[in-house]
């Protein structure tokens, strides 16, 4: 019985660590126990080990492993992708070799149907490079989305790629490119998820969750006869639980690693892709990417601190023109409207982007909680994100259609 307890504990620990690694960085979980555990696992833990190494060996271990550490965490590599494919393939192979003869034809027929999609979507998400912004497509990427003058401004330049960043783009230091409609870098596909391959990532989550649920069901189907109890006590009674636990041990012994082990692994981790898919469904409904949700979270914190103000672009441009023509005097100690307009990207040339909705808003955050000096009348304090327009939210259904079309 002890070895199977250890296997079960190991599977649950793997599931927990995977869950923390997947969800710990999400803005919505930043101030939750999951966010705290993520920081312990990925930030405080490694720093503590470095401290112990400095005390024990003078930092020799850290120094000798520095190149490996840099490669694993700061360079693009296929190690996680290879491990993911290897684990999925090995689990499928073990289960089929032992479980297939014990299944009826009606349950065997769907197996190829649920096995193929995770490989297909992983491949499509991994090889797609059309969302990388290059000199050849830079001009076209500027025509994809308008600037909202909140999350994205037209005067931002990528210091690595050395060009103006299109709206909704983000530079990925691992891939070495700016990514159109950047969502996040996914180690499971060894690629950045963006404008064109984000839909394949969603397909991977859905198909992987389906595969795991079906695999767990098949394992349960095979082992169900061993779980039959003869107790007449109520389900939550100690007697019933004791017999059920005894039967579970018999079932695990009968199924072995190839059926019981794979079934437990599939059942315990099936929630992860579905939970991540649910989170991305929320992002799609809200008209955001993961990158943008993090930016909105920063704006929300500054709003709660009383440091965010809103104005209209046309109002600011008109005022800027009056100041240039000497129509309005500058008060002593006031900020230059021309300088502010330049900082906010208002005087940059913008391409005319065809977009279903429009917004004239401009957001600014100040360090002192006061509106820009000399322009107090044009700015009003933002007290909630509800007062802010999300230019990229076209409505839940239309947002989904845009994603499925690779836009």
Image (cartoon, rainbow, N blue to C red):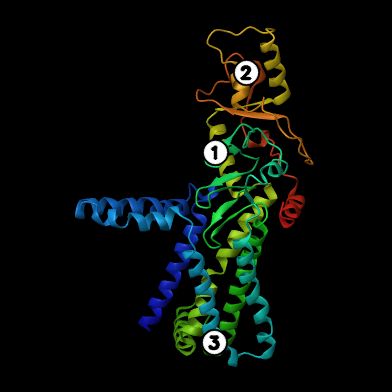
Q: Is residue 371 above or below residue 357?
A: above
Q: Estimate the x, y position of residue 290 in percent, counting from the top left.
A: 59, 49
| Residue located 54% across and 77% down the image | 89
Assess whether mark 1 and mark 2 are in contact (beta carbons under 8 angstroms): no
* Residue ID for mark 1: 298
Q: Estimate the x, y position of residue 12 in percent, counting from the top left.
A: 45, 70
Q: What label sits on residue 338 in the rendered view?
A: 2
Q: Earlier in the sequence, mark 3 or mark 1?
A: 3
Q: Locate residue 377: give its quadrant.
A: top right
Camera-side residue of 60 and 148:
60
Q: Is residue 299 above or below residue 30?
A: above
Spatial separation of the CA atoms under disc 2 and disc 1 = 26 Å
Q: Estimate the x, y position of residue 56 in percent, counting from the top left.
A: 20, 55
Question: Closer to the camera: disc 2 or disc 1?
Answer: 2
Q: Estimate the x, y position of residue 281 in percent, counting from the top left.
A: 66, 55
Q: Locate residue 371: give its quadrant.
A: top right
* Residue ID for mark 3: 223
Spatial separation of the CA atoms under disc 3 and disc 1 = 50 Å
Q: What label sits on residue 373 in the rendered view?
A: none
């Amino acid at each position: 019985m002890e070895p199977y307890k250890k296997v079960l504990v190991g599977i649950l620990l793997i599931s927990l660590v995977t869950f923390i690694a997947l969800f710990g960085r999400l803005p919505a979980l930043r101030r939750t126990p999951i966010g705290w555990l993520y920081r312990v696992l990925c930030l405080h833990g490694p720093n503590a080990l470095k401290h112990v190494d400095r005390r024990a060996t003078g930092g020799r271990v850290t120094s000798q492993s520095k190149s490996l550490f840099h490669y694993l965490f700061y360079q693009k590599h296929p190690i996680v992708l290879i491990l993911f494919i290897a684990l999925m393939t090995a689990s499928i192979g073990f289960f089929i070799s032992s479980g297939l003869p014990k299944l009826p034809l009606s349950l065997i027929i769907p197996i190829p149907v649920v096995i193929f999609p995770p490989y297909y979507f992983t491949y499509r998400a991994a090889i797609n490079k059309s969302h990388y912004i290059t000199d050849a497509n830079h001009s076209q990427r500027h025509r994809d989305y308008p600037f909202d003058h909140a999350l994205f401004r037209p005067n931002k330049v990528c210091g690595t790629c050395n060009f103006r960043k299109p709206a909704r783009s983000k530079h990925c230091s691992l891939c070495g490119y700016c990514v159109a409609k950047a969502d996040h870098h996914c180690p499971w596909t060894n690629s950045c998820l963006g404008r064109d391959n984000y839909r394949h990532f969603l397909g991977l989550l859905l198909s992987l969750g389906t595969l795991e649920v079906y695999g767990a069901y098949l394992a349960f189907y095979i082992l169900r006869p061993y779980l039959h109890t003869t107790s007449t006590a109520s389900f939550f009674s100690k007697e019933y639980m004791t017999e059920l636990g005894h039967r579970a041990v018999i079932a695990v012994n009968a199924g072995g690693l190839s059926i019981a082990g794979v079934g437990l692994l599939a059942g315990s981790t099936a929630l992860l892709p579905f939970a991540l898919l649910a989170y991305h469904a929320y992002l799609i409904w809200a008209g955001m990417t993961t990158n943008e949700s993090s930016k909105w979270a920063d704006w929300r914190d500054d709003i709660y601190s009383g440091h965010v103000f809103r104005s209209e672009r046309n109002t600011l441009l008109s005022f800027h023109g009056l100041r240039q023509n000497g129509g309005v005097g500058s008060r002593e100690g006031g900020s230059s409207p021309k300088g502010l307009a330049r900082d906010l990207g208002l005087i940059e040339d913008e391409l005319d982007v065809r977009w279903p909705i429009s917004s004239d808003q401009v957001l600014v955050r100040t360090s002192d909680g006061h509106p820009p000096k000399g322009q107090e009348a044009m700015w009003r304090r933002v007290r909630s994100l509800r007062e802010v327009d999300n230019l990229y939210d076209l409505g839940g259904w239309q947002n989904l259609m845009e994603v499925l079309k690779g836009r």
